[in-house]
Image (spheres, rainbow, N blue to C red):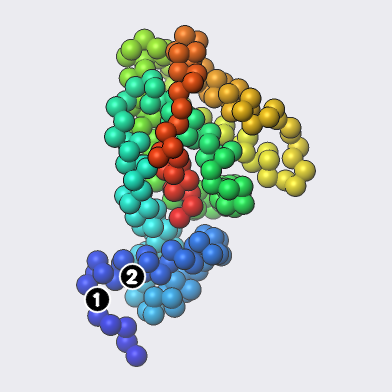
Amino acid sequence: MNPPRLSRDSRRQQIVDCALPLFAQNGFAGTTTKRIADAAGISEALLFKHFPSKSAVYSAILTDVCEADPGLMRLRALAPSTRTLVIFMRGMINWFFGTPGPAERNEKLRLVLSSQLEDGEFAQVLFDKVEQHVAPVFIDSLKAAIASGEARASEASPRDLFWFAHHTLSMLAASLLPRVPPLSFPPPAQFEREVREFLLRGIGLDDAAIAAYADCEMPRELLSEFCSLESA
């Protein structure tokens, strides 16, 4: 029996809705376009008329997650400033070492690492969305911090500094993946403070600004956005 006729937008949304639980249950690598098509009750040929690849389906899911996440919207609504930059950095550290739970976080880290060792497909899709939806908060706030005199300009662009910070955290978190980690770190509160100060100095904040915002708390309602992109 042929699948019911839907508008192009409705069919695309149906495919995305059917793919989401498959990615959640099986991960990116374990989900095939055939399984997505079967779940949507359509042929692979029809799926490919709407999405050229599995990556395109996953990208559409990430877009939906970003646009529907109230925490991310609240973060993006904060005025660019040094304070917002510190809140952002605390949130990013929290994602890698706090929320979401270790099992979910570790699964996503493994997917990214294995992708970068192979064809890079999953990592490219994920990083594109992070750069589109998350990085601008960092970039605009770092520019504001430089303009206020609380940070020094760097030869590296704010965009590159964002990825330097992101990948530093990613590799620190990756060192905790083995059952017996090859590195040991201080207790969580001390570790968070040391990593935060290291990164804030690395992106150019001066010591006075770091001290001034040392107790700047990550608002509870903003904690979700740092896990939403990587837990779709």
> Quick check: can you spot residue 152?
yes
Residue type pointed to by label 1: Leu
Instruction: Please identify the residue farthest to the front as the structure is shown.
Output: 220
Instruction: Please identify the residue farthest to the bottom as the structure is shown.
Output: 1
Q: Position of residue 218 (x, y in %)?
A: 45, 31
Q: Position of residue 92 (x, y in %)?
A: 49, 35
Q: Position of residue 47 (x, y in %)?
A: 36, 72
Residue identified by numbered label 2: 14
Residue type pointed to by label 2: Gln
Quick one: label 2, few (<14), some, or many (20+) residues within 10 Å? Answer: some
Residue occupying the point 42% across, 33% down? 219
Specify whether 9 is left or right of 69. left
Residue occupying the point 45% across, 18% down? 213
Query: The C terminus lies in which quarter of the figure?
Result: bottom left
**SS of the residue under disc 1:** loop
Quick one: label 1, few (<14), some, or many (20+) residues within 10 Å? Answer: few
> Quick check: can you spot residue 63?
no
**SS of the residue under disc 2:** helix
Residue identified by numbered label 1: 6
Residue 78: quadrant of the picture:
top left
Q: Position of residue 134 (x, y in %)?
A: 39, 38
Give 123 or 92, whichever is nearer the viewer.
Answer: 92
Mark 2 or 1 closer to N-term? 1
Above or below, 137 relative to 3: above
Give 167 or 46, whichever is nearer the viewer.
Answer: 167
